[in-house]
Image (cartoon, coloured by chain):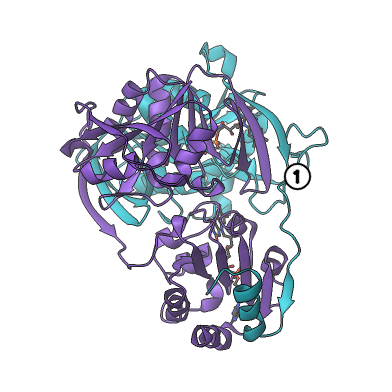
Chain colours: A cyan, B purple
Amino acid sequence: MKIIVPVKRVIDHAVRVRPSADGRSVEAASATMAINPFCEIALEEAVRLKEQGIASEVVVVSIGEPAAQEQLKAALAVGADRALLITTEKALEPLAVAQVLAHVVAEEGAELALLGKQAIDSDDNQTGQMLAALLGWPQATFASKVVINEGRATVTREVDGGLRTLSMPLPAVITTDLRLNEPRYARLPDIMKARKKPIDQRELSALGLELSSQVELLAIEEPQPRQAGMMVESVDELLEQLKNIDKVIL
Amino acid sequence: MSTLVLMAHRDGHIIGSSARLISAALQLGGEVDVLVIGHQMAGCAREAAALAGVNKVLVADDARYAGDIAEPAAALLAEQAKPYTHVLASASCYGKDVLPRAAALLGVSQVSEIIEVIDEATFKRPVHAGSLIATVRVDAPKKVISVRSTAFEPVGEQPEAECIALDPYGETLGVQLEGEELNRSGRPELMGARVVVSGGRGVGSRENFALVEALADKLEAAVGASRAAVDAGYVPNDFQVGQTGKVVAPDLYIAVGISGAMQHLAGMQGAKVVVAINRDADAPIFANADYGLVGDLFELLPELTAKL
Ligand SMILES: Cc1cc2nc3c(=O)[nH]c(=O)nc-3n(C[C@@H](O)[C@H](O)[C@H](O)COP(=O)(O)OP(=O)(O)OC[C@H]3O[C@@H](n4cnc5c(N)ncnc54)[C@H](O)[C@@H]3O)c2cc1C
Ligand SMILES: Cc1cc2nc3c(=O)[nH]c(=O)nc-3n(C[C@H](O)[C@H](O)[C@H](O)COP(=O)(O)OP(=O)(O)OC[C@H]3O[C@@H](n4cnc5c(N)ncnc54)[C@H](O)[C@@H]3O)c2cc1C
């Protein structure tokens, strides 16, 4: 079974992001970049499935600027076998990303696509579900446990109010939640070895796909800051405020 | 212009934020119909029909939809969406699961988690864990939108609108529900709660979390947590408040032993009044609180609970 893991290059979660001077994009020039944390979790799960002898090959794919090579190298060091980089200067909307991924999945003949549930930059939480729809595959989103057995995936999902377990035939799309696993760190020898693993780089335009482009970003701004609060000295003072000034408790 | 709203439900009731979702739908300007998909849905349909502003409720009631399985629901939603200009759902786990799948079946993009309607095609939504707000315009033949319901005021009630039964539609694609483990604490649901008390790593253990729960019970509040507290196993996963957990907007949010990381703040910025209790006077949470109390939570929580 071949697994495709799409990985997205994002601004590291610890960076304090700001709007660009023209208010049309995010200032990213000098920001530290990283693999989207949910993609790391998806990759870890795929590598574990390979280690258990369930997967035969793990292929990582990223769509974006050429610099995403850096994230693909990191993914190869963690245990992916091959990488595919589809380069474009344009920020694609999730449906377009899913359209490209559907093309890649078909071309590769993969039986499982493991994605992050959301990218921590645009926070869309769409791509996996859209990919599943385009492929006509079943989906298991927000996975906190994955078991693959005899052509079926049994997936425990994090839902509002608890957990729900579904089983489905492969091929399927699974998206990862935070507590599916704890991604490993790459070891130095593996980082060295990963340098020899192939990254196949292609221009998006060469795929000849007609991609959706229906969402336009008009502006990016900082939210209104919360009005400065006050420090209280005691529980009594706090209760006095909450009861008599804000009237949020009786 | 007309809008179809997919409504999430749990335990035979529509979810608490549904009245807020309808209010977002009404802001678009057109007629608002609701779609309820599930098994044994008569009660849910009537609850939806009683939300002010709802024109009619379409009900697809069939065993294939049990367990909120996305595949047949998305197929049905895409089919039913045909005559409408807008399709909305809340950014609940159900909405997040089904809506993008339906959008892709319709061949249109989706705008996720809007917090403001500017006009029928222009919306505001948070990105980067709420550190930034994006204004986006959708130029799609059909606009598919998920709504951060907490950002909208709830509508009131009305005499029940008409409910119309639909023929079941859509395949499960072989997906089967194997089991569920739902938390039934008897406390209000996090996303709709008027008061939320959240504990962080500072609470220290699962046993100590009883202090947070005791305060929550006094206030009839929902219990939340930071990711660190969930990762440490103090509480179940779905208690997590934040960028990658739940977004809450209660009248009162009490953060106990939580430092105030950006990813946590993302989930609570909509709260009207924020109280922070932390022993570190420099904790970033204080810069995001209306009232800060510096001290040891193991002394302050019991005192607060006792004085209520
Ligand atoms: C400042 C800014 C400006 C933007 N401008 C526009 C704009 O003008 N128009 C517009 O439509 N969108 C715009 N976007 C959004 C767009 O670029 C999103 O990143 C893209 O739509 C994918 O959404 P997501 O990453 O949030 O998807 P999600 O659905 O949250 O991602 C889930 C998973 O999908 C996979 N995935 C997503 N993207 C990729 C990728 N590129 N390569 C490989 N795997 C991937 C990963 O596995 C990821 O974990 C903008 C975003 C930002 C932050
Ligand atoms: C991709 C990604 C997604 C994330 N998503 C989320 C999310 O959705 N939600 C979320 O919450 N986090 C999220 N995080 C994690 C976030 O960055 C922080 O690590 C987390 O919120 C910290 O939790 P905390 O405040 O409980 O712990 P800490 O930062 O360790 O803070 C504990 C606090 O308790 C105080 N304290 C300790 N003992 C006491 C005492 N006796 N009395 C009073 N105060 C005390 C300390 O002073 C400290 O301020 C995410 C991170 C990443 C990378």
Residue A218's spot in the image, x, y percent? 70, 28
- B67 displayed left or right of B295: left
The three-letter code of the residue at mark 1 reads Arg
Q: Circle 1 sits on which residue?
A: A18
Q: Which residue: 50% across, 43% down?
A: A39
Is residue A197 visible from the viewing direction of this image?
Answer: no
Q: Quadrant of the N terminus of chain A?
A: top left
Residue B273's spot in the image, x, y percent? 62, 64
Q: Secondary structure at mark 1?
A: loop
Q: Is residue A104 above or below residue A11?
A: above
Residue B135's spot in the image, x, y percent? 66, 33
Mark 1 chain: A
Q: Is residue B186 above or below residue A4?
A: below
Q: Which residue: 47% across, 27% down?
A: A98
Q: Residue furthest front?
A: B159
Q: Which residue: 64% across, 57% down?
A: B262
Is residue B77 visible from the viewing direction of this image?
Answer: yes
- B194 displayed left or right of A173: right
The one of B5 and A77 positioned closer to us in this rendering? B5
The one of A69 and B206 positioned closer to us in this rendering? B206
- A245 displayed left or right of A193: right
The one of B46 and B145 positioned closer to us in this rendering? B46
Q: Which residue: 53% across, 60% down?
A: B250
Q: Is residue B300 above or below residue B161?
A: below
Mark 1 C-beta closer than 8 Å to ligand 1: no
Within 10 Å of the Cα at label 1, are there few (<14), some (14-19), or many (20+) other Cα atoms?
some
Q: How many marks?
A: 1
Q: Is residue B245 above or below residue A116?
A: below
